Structure formats: C-alpha cells, structure tokens
Amino acid sequence: MSVEEKVIESVKTRFPEDIIEAKVKRKNRVSISVRSNRIYDIGLFLRDELGFNHITSVSGVDYIDMNELEVIYTIWSIDKKILASLRTKIPRDNPTLKSLINVWEGVLYHERETWEMFGIKFEGHPDLSSLLLPEEWDGPPPLRKDFLLPETPQEKLEEKIKRAGGW
Amino acid sequence: MSVMKLSMGPQHPITGHFRFILDVDGDLVLKLEPDIGYTHRGIEKLAEKRTYLQNLPVIERVNSYCDSAGTMLGYLEAIEELMGLEVPERAKYLRVIAAELNRIASHLYAACLFSVATGLETMLMWPINDRELVLDLLEKLTGQRITYTYQTIGGVRFDMPEGFKEEALKRLDYLEKRTEDYYKMLLWNHTFHMRTKKVGILKPSDAIKLGVVGPNLRASGVKVDVRKDEPYEVYDKFDFSIPTGKNGDSYDRLEVRFKEVEQSINILRQALKDIPKGPIKKWAPPIVPKGEAYTRVEAARGEFGYYIVADGTMKPYRLKMSPPSFRNLIALPHLCKNVPLGDIPVIYISLDLIPMDVDR
C-alpha cells in the first residue's frame, strides 16, 4: 500500500460518516471531500495525526449551476511529501464555514482573500476586512460567476457567429 | 511616549506599491500591518474570460520583471497534466534553462535591493549590471528582456540560437567568479553583519506553521524544494543540492539566495551539456478536457501553486494562483514586532516580497 492510500485509509476509518469522498488522484496528490460542519475536526486530525503541516492555498470555486460554493484547502506534508486537498461544499445563499485559523495559522490572508472574492464568511476569523480590493468597494464578490465583466471583442464575435448558425 | 500610528508607503517604502501601517512608540515598532492591493489586476478573473493560450502573457505579468519564466511553468504543467500531453525532451531542457537563468536574474535583483536597504550602494550597481548579462542571454534565447512568453503549451516557441551555448557557458564562468566579489563586498562586510545578523529571526517551527515558502523557508533550516520533492520537467536528471541556512535571520535569507545562484549555475551547466536534439514543440489542441489539477513549481521566490478547474471548453472555469510572495507576506507582521524602525526595510527586503506577486 502506498503512502497516499494509507492516508486515505486512516481518514476513512477515523471519520466514516463525515467523508463524502476520499481518493488518490495521482502520485503525491490526495483529495478528501468532507461535510462542511466537520471540516475543523478533520483538519485537526490531518495536522496532528497525519503530519499535514504546511498550508499551500485556500481557494474557492463557484458552481453556480448547482448553487454551491466549494472551498478547497490544500496542505502539504513536509515529511510524507503529499499534497492533500481538503474540500467542502456549502450553499451559495448562506456561505458560512468555520475558520481553520486555529488549525493552520497560515490561512490568515488566504481565508481573508476567499471571503473577499467569494463572500464566504469564515466564523472565528479575527479580521475579515478588505484585502486586495479597494476599501470603498461595495459590489458583489468579484470572483463569483454572476459578477460579469464587460464583453470582450472576441466574445462579441463568438456571439455573432453563434447567431449566424456557427462557422 | 504614547503609541502613534504611522503610514509607510504606498509610494515605494523601499520598493513596490505597498503600505505598512505601523504602531510606533518612539523608535520602536510595536505592530506592523501590511496594506496590500495597490497593484491588484484581477488576473484570476481575467483568466476566466480568455482562452488558455491567450492567458499566457497575462499570467506572466503576475511576476513580470523578476521571474516570468519560472512563474509560467506551473500554469503549463497544469494544462499539460489535464491534457495528458508529453512535452518533447529538448523543450523541457529549454524551459529549465530559461527558468534557471531567470532565477539568477531574480536573486541578483534581490541582492541589489538588499544593499539599498542596508545603505551599501556600490553593491546596488554590481549585481544589477551582472543581471543585465543574464537578461542579454535570455534575450538571445527568447527575444525579450523581461516578459518572454517563451514557454508555451506543448513546448517552447524558439530553439536555441547558434552560439548560445558557448556564450552562456562563458557568462556563467564570469558570474561564478563574480560571486566571490559579492561575498567580499557584501556578505563578509562587517557593516552588513551588524545590520542583518540576528535581525528578523524566523524560527523553523514558525516558518512551517505560517506557511512560508522558498528561500525564506530554507533559510530557517527547513529543506523544502519542489524541484527535489516532486521533480517537474527534467529536474530529476540534474545533480544539485538545496542550500539551507542556520539561524533564519535576514543575513541567512540573502546568503541562501547567493548559494542558490551557485546551484543554478551548476544546473545550467549540466543542462547545456546534456540537452538532446529533437523537436521543441508538440501540437496541443485548444480545448482542455474536463477535470482539475493542482501543480506546483519552484519559482525564484518560492513555491508557486496553480489550481485549474477545466470544464471542457477553451477557457478555464477557474484559475487559482498561489504565489510565493503572498504566502511569505504573513511572515512580515510576525517578524516586525518590537523591532526598531530602522530594521523594517531590512526585514521587508530580506523576505523578497514583490507587490505584483502579492496582489496578482
């Protein structure tokens, strides 16, 4: 059994109910999809028991068709040399998630950025204020899919071609 | 004395468009709060509007004047992983050559900024002059001094010009000799020791906890390098070591960078010697199949992560960038607690933060 499979196995045995899907994606990559209310405990387990100690990124993805937002924490284990992505889906209308700042201190700016760009409220985060956007910004979270940028000339052309019945 | 709020920046505190909000008590800085976003261009959102190929020059500008070749690699790696595309061997070597030359240029630039922060301004001229030699070399290879768009999906755009190899080896020899001068001029300089030793000590446990990456993490004594941990391109074929520091202070952070230049010269010599003949580009379809990939590369400032969600069209559904400077930023308020005001530039420069890289 490879190191990656062992990680999946131990997470599955410890949290049989809360893991939606856990799989090895390729060498050095595992993906663990969990229920949003247990992400804090699973994060603690990953840090303390499995040695995932080095936070790499926190990213959000807006799946507007399913009315869901996905939050992905990617954590590198320096000893095991595995990158785990701990992911959870939350409803788009009321996106709240417990902050993992007490698990990995390094998520401070990452979570703040995700809050700003996707409007996900991280409960327990010490400072959710404007980071990259201007202070006077009062539009919707810009990286959500319903925040539209002006049409580019290329898109106008594509639209025209589409209306004319394709190439 | 009472505590006063002081704003440092955003018009070039030392470099870049970046503001510190300081709580000062006399000369003592109690707290530093970085205020970023002055060069935010929304590249992640822009990328969703453009095709994968159109994104290349945009993404390069995340870290344009220092390390565009190293920055781009991760994006290409992610796309090629999704496509299952195998890049020709010669192209891989050429990519590595461009990235390593860029690493040297970036570290020399860091050294020159460092000397400005410590007031040793002869050392500003030397590395910036030598950096120009490297940029000339890159211009010969790619056609541009700073923003190359040299690497592309499936390979590289141009082959090595005639006489490049000899010219490169000659300049590498010169640079290696020149590094000794840097040691004499800067690193063994007593004034420099006084300004940088025991300033801004980052403990290894803190560095890992905060998620610091790259030379800053290695200066604290943690041996982490993506080129060794999960070799991409052809890095597994080269024989090189990962330099680490002992104390994790500002001095070590610069010393590690100089040692990395030596290692880059070492890698480049091997790459120029071993480079095989063959094609330099493989045709790649414009559509990337559905899926997601997270790739990491070791850019000059540290590990650069790319997360791409592809939905089976010509444009990415989501592109997340995790640049090294953004991740090193958290070390700045951590290190700038109860330090004299004069040490702030030294600590800031020693972390080698680039505002464009922080803001994207």
Image: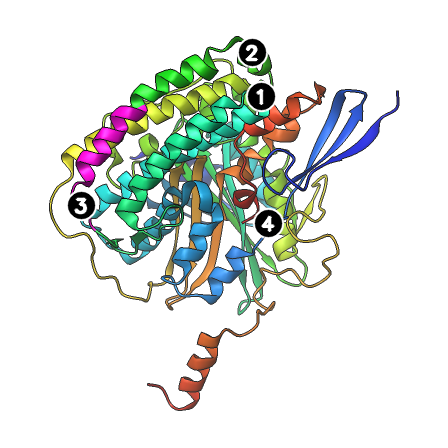
Instruction: Tell me the residue at 57%/42% (across/down).
Output: B355
User: What is the distance, in whole Å, between disc 1 and disc 2 at their CAs?
Assistant: 9 Å
Q: Tell me the residue that label 3 is attached to.
A: B90
Q: Report helix, strand or loop for mark 4.
A: loop
Q: Nearer the viewer, mark 2 or mark 3?
A: 2
Residue at disc 1, secondary structure: helix
Dot 4: chain letter:
B
**Is A130 situated above or below B13?**
below
First in residue order: circle 4 vs circle 2: 4
SS label for mark 3: helix
Give A58 or B187, whichever is nearer the viewer: B187
Instruction: Check disc 2 and give the amino acid type.
Output: Thr
Give the alpha-carbon distance from disc 1 to disc 3, as whole Å: 42 Å
Q: Considering only order in the chain, which callout, 4 or 3, is on the residue closer to the N terminus? A: 4
Which numbered disc, 4 or 1, marks the residue that appears first in the sequence? 4
> Which residue bears the numbered disc 1?
B118
| Closer mark to the observer between disc 3 and disc 4 | 4
Mark 4 closeness class: few <14, some 14–19, many ≥20 residues within 10 Å = some
Q: Does residue B204 appear to the left or right of B126 in the view shown?
A: right
